[in-house]
Each structure stands twice: as structure tokens, then as C-alpha cells.
Amino acid sequence: MTERYAVIGHPVAHSQSPDLHARFAQATGEDIEYGRIEAPLDAFERTVDEFRAGGGRGLNVTLPFKHAAFRYCDEVAERAREARVVNTLVFGERTRGDNTDGVGLVRDIEGNLTVTLGGKTVLLMGAGGAAQGVVGALLGARVGRLVVANRTFAKADALATRFKVTAARFDDVREPFDIVINATSAGLGTEPAVFPTAAIGKATLAYDMVYARDTAFLRMARDKGARCADGLGMLVEQAAESFFIWRGVRPQTRSVLASLRGG
């Protein structure tokens, strides 16, 4: 019997998750159907209830609903409890939440980009749901130093205090880091992009969680001679982890990522 899953967000038409999960299902022989659900901004819970009542077995959750998904759950995995955001819902007698963003990021950087995180200095730009979902995994990878920077210092300080790392304003960053991760939406809208440019050196890996776009952050980093990567690999790896949570089968990701990149 075909079991139903989907990604829920607002907007969600651009999401590549249905294609990813279709590839995973074909490769593993799992019988699933995976779609997109664009929920009204004020009706996340109702939309999830309707999907669940219709036999839905699980959801991936994207912006702007990751905090709402955390509140929706009856129970959450430890990494989701730590992050306080959820991107994967599992429906049974109770609703269980998990967060696969952090493991997706770490697997992309270390596995696909072959950059060891252990001992490295890392600047994480942003303090919203995207950043919250990855701090624990970065610390678990034993980075040497992690700094959370945000234009609004209070938000950076709140996140850094939770995880016992360092907080900074963008203006406070005056030296290069081994790895700089952009977890903000700066440069995607109409407002001018502002970044701590001093954090980027020629030996820096500049990583933007946004995928399929040449962002202002990546252009700036490329102009400074840094190695650049977008978030497509993170998307693939976090999706594979969600698939494993739902189906108990871990799909291979290298060929899928290569295909998406046109390799």
C-alpha cells in the first residue's frame, strides 16, 4: 500500500523535496507518494491535522513553520529538543518531531566537500530557525571554535548562550574563519546585503544554506578568493535522513547529488 508524505511550507512550489524522495523511493524500492503542501501562514496546525486525518504518514517542514512544528509535536528527538525547531514530523498514535538539518549540513561538509570540521574555527551567520537547527551538530563534530553572529546581537546572544558558544555582532568580526556558514536570508529580498566580510579569507570555505541561487554572500566570498558551496548537498543529506526516519532505509546520496548538479 502506497504511503503518503509531503513537504509543507509557505511558499513551497520551489521545493526539490518531491523529486529527491521520488529518487530515494525508486532506489530503495519503497512504495511512497510525496507531494507539496502550501499552508496558509495562519493555518499550519489545521493543515497538518487535515493531512494526518487523510492518512498522511509524515511531513518535512520548511520555512516559516519549523518553530510551529516543534510546538505541534507530542514528543521530539533529542536533537530537535536541543534545536527547538522541527523539520521532520512522523505520524503514529503520537506525533514525533525530529530535526535533520544539522546532520545534513555536517554530512555535506565532511562527506561531500571533504572538509573536516574537527578543530576548525566556524562562523555561523544568523540566529533563526535555520541556525538553531545546526549548532548542536556542529558542536558534535568537535569544531574548535564556534561563533554565532547576527545583525541583531540579542538574537545571537540568546542562541549562543543556550549552547555555551560565543556571540558577536557582524561589526565585531575582524579576522578570517576556516568556515563561514550563512544561515540568513540576507541578499534574497530587496534590502541590501550586509555581511562580516573580514571573516572571509582565501582559505575559507564559504557555505550558504540557500541552494540553486548565486547569492550575494557567495558572490562576495568568491570575489575574495574563497572556496564556495551552496546548500544543495545539505538539502539532499537532510532529506535522506528524513527518509531513513520514516522508512528505516538509508538511501545513497552521492549519485543523487551528482545528478542534481548535472554531473
Image: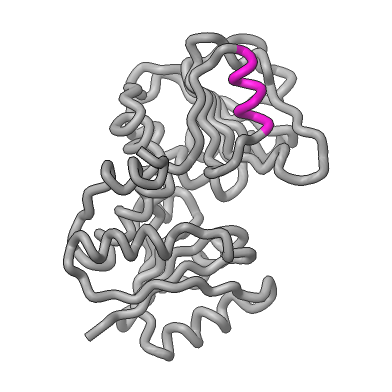
Along the horizontal axis of the image, is 249 left or right of 190? left
257 over 51 or under it: above or below: above
Between 130 and 232, the residue placed more toward the observer is 232
Q: In the image as oriented, which residue stretches furthest toward the front?
A: 262
| On-image quarter of the N terminus | bottom left
The residue lying at 29 percent from left, 75 percent from top is: 32
Residue 219: within the magenta? yes
Q: Measuring from the top left, give residue 227's x and y in whole percent.
A: 49, 19
Main SS of the magenta part reads helix
Q: Measuring from the top left, give residue 143's x and y in whole percent.
A: 39, 23
The residue lying at 48 percent from left, 10 percent from top is: 203
The answer to which image quadrant residue 117 occupies is top left
* Magenta region, residue range: 216-224
Between 246 and 211, the residue placed more toward the observer is 211
Between 41 and 127, the residue placed more toward the observer is 41
Along the horizontal axis of the image, is 230 left or right of 31? right
Q: In the image as oriented, which residue stretches furthest toward the right?
A: 191
172 over 42 or under it: above or below: above
Q: Measuring from the top left, give residue 114's x and y in whole percent.
A: 31, 25
Residue 141: within the magenta? no
238 over 162 or under it: above or below: below
The residue lying at 53 percent from left, 43 percent from top is: 211
The residue lying at 70 percent from left, 17 percent from top is: 172
Q: Measuring from the top left, give residue 13's x and y in whole percent.
A: 58, 65
45 over 21 or under it: above or below: below
